[in-house]
Image: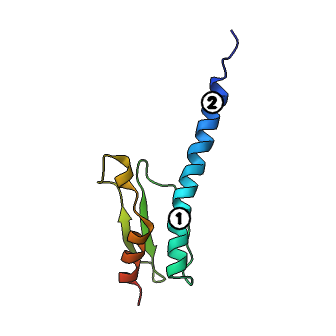
Amino acid sequence: MASRGRKRKFEAAVIAAAEKQEKLAGGRKEALRLEAPELPVKVNPAKPRRGSFEVTLLRPDGSSAELWTGIKKGPPRKLKFPEPQEVVEKLKKYLP
């Protein structure tokens, strides 16, 4: 039996979801870069936890400070993702 194009539709949906995640992370990344241009910003240097969105400040001494975690937020799902300005405000608390 011939395929009905399900595989292509699924692949297109996966690509669209990945592009959306990059777009969402890109806005937060740019907001952080504008606030503190001297800080390097890395998106997921390690494999992320499933179903979560977290922003962590890694200090030069090896310690870390959590700026945002959406693990216990929601539903709705949009509550799991912060506004860029919200992350920037928390970052300001940790910068000298």
Residue type pointed to by label 1 = Gly
Spatial distance from mark 1 to mark 2, Cα to Cα?
27 Å
Mark on residue 27? 1
Q: Residue at x 42, y 75 (%)?
A: 88
Is the residue marked by circle 2 packed among few (<14), some (14-19), or many (20+) residues within 10 Å? few
Q: Give SS at disc 1.
A: helix
Corner quadrant of residue 1: top right
Towards the viewer: 64 or 12: 12
Q: Position of residue 39 (x, y in %)?
A: 54, 80
Instruction: Answer with mark 1 or mark 2, whichever residue precedes in sequence.
Output: 2
> Quick check: 22 above or below 8?
below
Q: Position of residue 35 (x, y in %)?
A: 50, 80
Q: Which mark is residue 9?
A: 2
Q: Secondary structure at mark 2?
A: helix
Residue 63 rendering spot, x and y as whole percentages:
41, 77
Residue shown at 54% from the left, 78% from the top: 34
Image side of residue 19 versus residue 57, left or right: right
Q: Residues within 10 Å of mark 1 (few under 14, many from 20)?
A: some
Visual colour scheme: rainbow
Q: Is residue 45 visible?
A: no
